[in-house]
Image (tube, coloured by chain):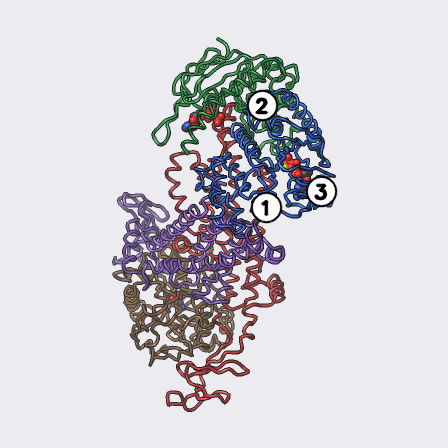
Chain colours: A green, B blue, C purple, D red, E brown
Amino acid sequence: MSGLSIENISMRFDLPNGSSVQALKNVSLHLKEGELMSVLGPSGCGKTTLLNIVAGFLAPTEGHIAMNGHKVHGPNAERGMVFQQGALFEWMNVRDNVSFGPRMKGQRASQYGSHVDHLLDVTGLGDFKDKAIYELSGGMQQRVALARCLANDPDVILMDEPLGALDALTREKMQGLVLKLWKETGKTIILITHSVEEALLLGERLLVMAPRPGRIHKEYRLPYADMGVNADLREVKKSEGYSQTREEILSMIWDMEEEIMGRTEAAQ
Amino acid sequence: MSGLSIENISMRFDLPNGSSVQALKNVSLHLKEGELMSVLGPSGCGKTTLLNIVAGFLAPTEGHIAMNGHKVHGPNAERGMVFQQGALFEWMNVRDNVSFGPRMKGQRASQYGSHVDHLLDVTGLGDFKDKAIYELSGGMQQRVALARCLANDPDVILMDEPLGALDALTREKMQGLVLKLWKETGKTIILITHSVEEALLLGERLLVMAPRPGRIHKEYRLPYADMGVNADLREVKKSEGYSQTREEILSMIWDMEEEIMGRTEAAQ
Amino acid sequence: MTASRSTTIIFDKNDETSRKEGAKIVAIDGTPISIGQSIKTAAGQFSLTDKGAISFQPPSGLQMEPIWLPPPEAVVSRLGEIAKSGYRDSTLWEHLGFSLFRVIAGFFFGALVGIPLGYAMGLSDWFRGWFDPIVEFMRPVPPLALIPLVIIWAGIGETGKIILLFLAALWIMAIAARSGVSGVRISKVHAAYSLGASKAQIMRYVIVPNSLPEIFTGARVAMGVCWGTVVAAELVAAEKGAGMMIMVASKFQLTDIVIMGIILIGVIGFGIDILMRWAERVLVPWKSKG
Amino acid sequence: MTASRSTTIIFDKNDETSRKEGAKIVAIDGTPISIGQSIKTAAGQFSLTDKGAISFQPPSGLQMEPIWLPPPEAVVSRLGEIAKSGYRDSTLWEHLGFSLFRVIAGFFFGALVGIPLGYAMGLSDWFRGWFDPIVEFMRPVPPLALIPLVIIWAGIGETGKIILLFLAALWIMAIAARSGVSGVRISKVHAAYSLGASKAQIMRYVIVPNSLPEIFTGARVAMGVCWGTVVAAELVAAEKGAGMMIMVASKFQLTDIVIMGIILIGVIGFGIDILMRWAERVLVPWKSKG
Amino acid sequence: AEGEITVAYFLEWPMPFEYAKQKGTYDEVLGVKVNWVSFESGVKMSAAMASGDVHLSVSQGVPPFVVATSAGQDLQILDVAVSYADNDNCVVRSELEIDKDNAGELAGKKVAVPLGTAAHYGFLKQMNHFGVDVASMDVVDMDPPDGAAAIAQGAVDMFCGWGGSLRRALEHGNVLLTGDEKTELGILVFDVTSGPAGWVAENSDLVAKFLKVTADANAMWADEANRAEMLPLIAKDAGMDEEATASTIATFKFPTIEQQLSGGWLGGNAQTFMKGVADVFVEAGSIDSALDTYENAVNTGPLSAAGGM
Ligand SMILES: Nc1ncnc2c1ncn2[C@@H]1O[C@H](COP(=O)(O)OP(=O)(O)OP(=O)(O)O)[C@@H](O)[C@H]1O
Ligand SMILES: Nc1ncnc2c1ncn2[C@@H]1O[C@H](COP(=O)(O)OP(=O)(O)OP(=O)(O)O)[C@@H](O)[C@H]1O
Ligand SMILES: NCCS(=O)(=O)O
Ligand SMILES: [Mg+2]
Ligand SMILES: [Mg+2]
C-alpha cells in the first residue's frame, strides 16, 4: 500500500500533577502519494501532536505510522517538516540552510549544488543566497524553510501553520507557491492551519479535528486546490460553494471554540 | 457647527538625517456628533498620525482641529483615546483603571462610584472589578480600556486598532460591544483598523487613506453598522453588496501595499 | 598544592652512624633502592633524596590534610562552636550582622540618592546632559577599585565602608531609575493625558509605578554587588564582619572557619536574592506579565 | 574625613613645668577656656582635649588639601610621569598589563572548563543532577570571599590570583552554556533530525552555534566580574598590578595616583566591555535579531 | 623553574645579607638564580611558601612561623636571622597621652595589628602584662604599612608593627615599653630563616650555601671597619636613607653560627620559646591548638653544614 498510513493512533500525556491529557484518540487516516491534506481544528485539539507523531518526534501511546506499508519509528529524512517560524539556523546563510540536509548526509557541494540552486530559484531566493537569515523578511524566511525541506527530497512534507506569522499579502503569495511546488514535485503534504480560507484553498482533502480527546470530526474533499494551481486565488474564492463551505466550517469551529472558551471563562 | 472638524491638516516629520516625511497632506474632514467613522489604509499612510493630531498629542504642521466650532490644542478629557494594547495601568486593578479619569479630576468614590459600576456591568466586567490587569484575557483588557475611556464621558472617542491583537472569536464579540455602546451612548467615534471586514461592519462612514503623502483616497457611506446593531454580525456579512464592497476595498488597499512593498523589496 | 603529608625522613637522626660516615639506605621493605629511584609499598611511596634521606609520600588519597580541606563535619562543628562562643570577641551573628548592616545602609543611601537622580535624568534633558557621562563612566569602575580612595577620604571605619557601598549602589540605582522612566510606553502617558491627568499626576500615577519593575531589577543587582563589595572591603581593612572573619582565619590557617565563612556568605547572598525576588513578586506583581 | 590638618599641641612638651604638676591652659588668644570648650580665632578653632592639651583645627575651607582631591591637571601630569618612569619599579603598562594578563588567563581557563561543564549539564540529566546544586550555590558567593581560601590553597602568587579569577569566571560560564543549550528551540532540533542529522551533527551544527549568543552574554558578565575581582585581589595581596598601584599609592596618600589608577581601571573595564560587544556583534550577528 | 629559587624578605628592614644580595653573591655561590620578593608580613611568607612560590623566607618572625606549623604546615627553621626588641613595638597616638603608667586606658581603643605576626605576639604579651582585656579593644588586622598610614590619619589609636612603618608611626605617638623593658618581661623578638621541609630536604646543599653567605655577611658587618662599605648597599636594598638604616640596624643583633647552634638559641631555647608563643596564641583564641613540641620544626642540619664550610 503506497503512501502514508496513520493507523489507530492514540496519545496520552501524563502531567506532572498525576493527571493526564488524552491529546489524540484512535485517529486513523491514509494519504495516497501526492495528496495534499489540510487540517483545521480549534486550539488544543491535537493537530501539532498528530504531526509530531507522523514526523517521529513523539512516540504514540497506541497505534503506529507506516510509509508504503512499512512501520516507521523516529524522525527520518523521508518525512520533512516545515515549521511556523524560528526553525531556521540563523548562524548559516540562506544557501547553507537550504543545503543542510545534503551536507549532513556527507554530500559535497558538487553533488548538491545544482539542485539547491534550482530550489533557490524556484522559491525566488536566487538573489539572496548569501544573505543572513535575519536580513530576510518573514515571507522569505518561510521560503527558505520550504526550500530547505525540499532540498532533502522527502516523500512527505509536514507543515505546522507554516504561514501563520505572515501578513495577509505575503501569506497569499506563499499559498500560491505551496500549490505550485505541490503540483510540480508531486509530494504528499499535510498542512496544519488556523485559517479556514487557507485550508479551503490549499487542501485537496480537508480534515476538521475536534478536541477532548483529539479526534477526526469531519473530512471534506475539495476542488479549490486544483483550481488554484492555475487560477488566481482571489478568483477561486468567488467560485460556487466556496462561501458556503467556508461558513459551514467556520461555524463548526466557532462552536467548538465557544464550548472550550465558555468552560475556561467560567473557570476564571 | 457641532461635531469634530479636521481642517486642512498637514504634518511633516523632520528626520535626524535632515530629510523629512510628509505624513499627512491637506486632510480635511467633518464628523457630526454621534457619527462612527472607520479608517482604513496601508501601513504608513498616516492613520495613527491623524488620530494623534486629533487627540492633541501631536501639533500639526498646518491646519487645526475644532470641536463644535472652537479650535482645540493639546490633549483633553473631551477627546478620549482607546489604544490597541499596553495602555492600561497594570499597577491598578480593573476598577481603579476605569475610575482613573474621575479620580484625576478630584472626584470621590461616592461621586463616580455608581457610574463606574454601571460601565463595568455594561462591558461585562462586573465580576472582575478587583482583578489585576494581567489576570484578564486580551478581550477583557480591551473592554477595560473602553470602559476607562467612557468613564470620563468624552465627546469623541478615538480608537487606534483597538481590536488588532485579539483572536477572531473575541474580536467579533468586541465588535458587537462597540456597536452597542455607540448606539447607546451616541458618542462620536473614529476607529482605525487594518481589517476591511471590521471597517465595513462598524463604520457608518468608511475612509480609505493613501500614502506618500498621507491623504484621503476615498470615502464610503455604509449601512452595515446600523444593521449590525440589531442583527447578528455573521448575518450582516451575507447581505447584498457586502462582498462586493469588501473585494473592492481589498483590491484598492492591496494595490497600494503592493506598490509600497515592491519598492522596499527592490531596495533590499 | 605543595604542602602535603609527604615527609622526608632523615633516617640517621636517631642512629649512631650518620650519613657522613658512609651509612646508606640500600633497601626499603625488602626491595633494593638507590638514589633517585622510588618504591611503592602498601603504605605509600618511598624514594631517596639526593642526599640519601628517605622521602615518604603516603598514597595521594590521604594527602588532603585538614589545613587544605577540612572534612565537612569539622566545618559543621566549627559552625556550632562559633555560633555559640563567637570568633575574635564577636559572635558569629555580630560578624554577619555587621556586614549586613553595612550593605543595607550603603544600599539605602545609594537608592535614596540614585533613584531621584535617575528620575531627573530620565525626565530632564539638562540633567541627562550633565549626569549621563558621569554615570556611564562610573558604572564600569569596579566598586572595589574605589576602596583606596575611600580610605583616603573617610578612613577605614564604618563611614568609609558605607560610602563605598553607597557608591556601589548609586550608579546601578540611577541607571535603573533612568531606564525605568524612559521605558514608559508613550501610549500610557498619552492615555493619562487624554483622561485629564496633570503633569504631576502623570508623574505620580503613571511614571513612578511604571518604573518600579526596573528599579527592582536594579535593586537586585545592586544588592548582589554590595554584598560582594562589603566582603571585599572587610578583607582589605578588616574589622568586624564576615569578610574579616574569613580573612583572619586564613592567616591562622583555620581552613574550617574559612570554609564555614564562605558558605555562610554564599547562603546570605543567596538569601538576599531570594528575598529581593520575593519582594519583587509581591510589590510589582505585574512585572513581565504586562 | 578623619585625617585633616587638625593637630594636638602638647603644650608642655617643651616647658619646664608639666601638666602633671598642675600647669593648665586657662586662656587662648586672650579668651578664657576650660576643658571641653572651644574657641574660634582667625587662624582656626582651638579646644582643650580631656587631658588638657590644645587641639587645633584650621578653618574647614582650607581642609580640601590636594591629598583629598587633587586638581585634574595634577592627575594628568601624574599620568604622564608614571607612563614614562613607572611606579614601584614597574611601568604603568606593566601594572595594567599584569592585571589584564591575570584576567585573561583566569577567564580563559574558566571558559575552558565552564563551557563544557555547562554543555554537559544542559545535555545530561546525570550531570545536571550532580552539578546543578554546586553551580547554583557557588554563583551567589562573591568571588572575593574565596580569596582567603585561595591564599591557603595556592598562596598569594600568580597561581592563586589566576585560580581566583578562574573560579570567578567558571560558574558564570557554566550557567551561560547551560542556558544556551536549554534555550535551543526544540523546533530547530526537530528540523535538523528530520533533515537527517545525527546526534553528533545536531550537537555540532545546531546546539553549539545556537548557544553562542548566551555564551557571549555570559562572557561579557564574566569579564566584568573578573576585572573587578583582579583589582580587588591585588588590593589584598599586592605585587604588581593596577589594584596594587592604587592601594600602595593610597597608603602614601598620593591621591593623584589613586584617582589616575581608578580612571584607568574604569577606562579599561569600559574598553573590555566595548571589545566584547564588538566581538559579539561580529561573531554572533544573528543575536537578538532571530 | 629549574635552576632558580625564590626568597622572601622585608623592605625597610636593613640586614647585612642585603649587602650580599646587592653584590650578587648568592647567585654566585649557589649557582642558581635567586629571585627576591618582598612581603608585608611573615604570615604572607607562610602563605607563599605553602603555595610553593617561595622556597626560603629571610627574617620571618617566630610567631607567624609558629602559627603555620601549628596548623600543620611543614616548615622548618634553618637559622636565626636577627634578634631585635626595639624594632617591633606598639605605638599609641600622642594626644591620648597613654604610657606604661596609665596603660589601663587602652581598654576600648582601636588598634591596628598585623595578626599572626611578631607584632601581634608582642601586643598580646604587653596587654597581658598591663592587664588590658584584648576583647575590650577594637582590633583591626592591618599590615604595618597600612597601620602606619592609619595612625597617621588618626584612624586608629594604637599601632603595632616593625621596621620603617614603626618609625613612621613613632612620629605620631609613643611606645608603651622600650625594647629592654620588653626583654626583661621575656617578650623576645627574633626572626629566622625558614623554608618548606620537603624542599629543604631535597636541596640541603643549596640551603647550607645560602646560610653560609648570610652568616658571612653578618660576620663582615660585625667588623666595624666594613660598615662604611656595606651601609650604602644595605640602605639601597632596604629602600631607606643611610641615616635611618644605620640607626635601625644598630638595634639589631646578629648571632654567629656557633651562638645560633648553642642552647641559648636553636639548641633548645628557641623550641621552648616557640611553645610559649603557641600557647599565647591558643589562649588568645587565634589558633586551635599548639603542637606538643616544636623540636621537629627546627632543622640545624644545613646550618651545621654551613658552619663546617
Ligand atoms: N508535551 C506535552 N505535555 C503535556 N501535554 C501536552 C504536551 N503537548 C501537548 N499537550 C496537550 O495536548 C493537547 C493537544 O496539543 P496540541 O499542541 O497538539 O494542540 P494543537 O491542536 O496543535 O493546538 P494549537 O492550535 O494551539 O497549536 C493540548 O491539550 C495540550 O495541552
Ligand atoms: N515621530 C515620528 N518621526 C518621524 N516619522 C514618523 C513619526 N511618526 C510617524 N512617522 C512617519 O509618518 C508616516 C505615517 O506614520 P503612521 O504611524 O501615522 O502610519 P499608520 O498609518 O498608523 O501605519 P500603521 O498602519 O503601520 O500603524 C510613516 O512614514 C512614519 O514612518
Ligand atoms: N620582622 C618580622 C615580622 S613577622 O614575620 O612576624 O611578620
Ligand atoms: Mg499546534
Ligand atoms: Mg498606526
What separation in Å lies between label 1 and label 3 (alpha carbons)? 23 Å
Q: Where is A64 relative to E114, above or below?
A: above
- The answer for which chain carries disc 3 is B
The answer to whether mark 3 is within 8 Å of ligand 2 is yes
Which residue is located at x 27 percent, y 65 percent?
A: E283
Q: Which residue lies under the disc numbered 2?
A: B236
Residue E193 visible in the picture: yes
Along the line of sight, which residue is nearer the eye, E103 or A216?
Answer: A216
Mark found first going from the N terminus, 1 or 3: 3
Residue type, numbered disc 1: Ala
The residue carrying mark 3 is B11
Q: Which comes sooner in the sequence, label 2 or label 3?
A: 3
Mark earlier in primary sequence (2, 1): 1
Q: Relative to the observer, which residue lies in front, C44 or E51?
A: E51
**Measured from the top left, where is residue B62 in percent x and y?**
73, 44
Crowd class of label 2 (few under 14; some 14 to 19; many from 20; radius 10 Å): some
Residue E28 vs residue C73, the one in the foreground: C73
Report whether mark 1 lies on the same chain as mark 3. yes
Going by the numbered disc 2, the residue's amino acid type is Val
Mark 1 highlights which residue? Answer: B77
- Dot 3: element: strand
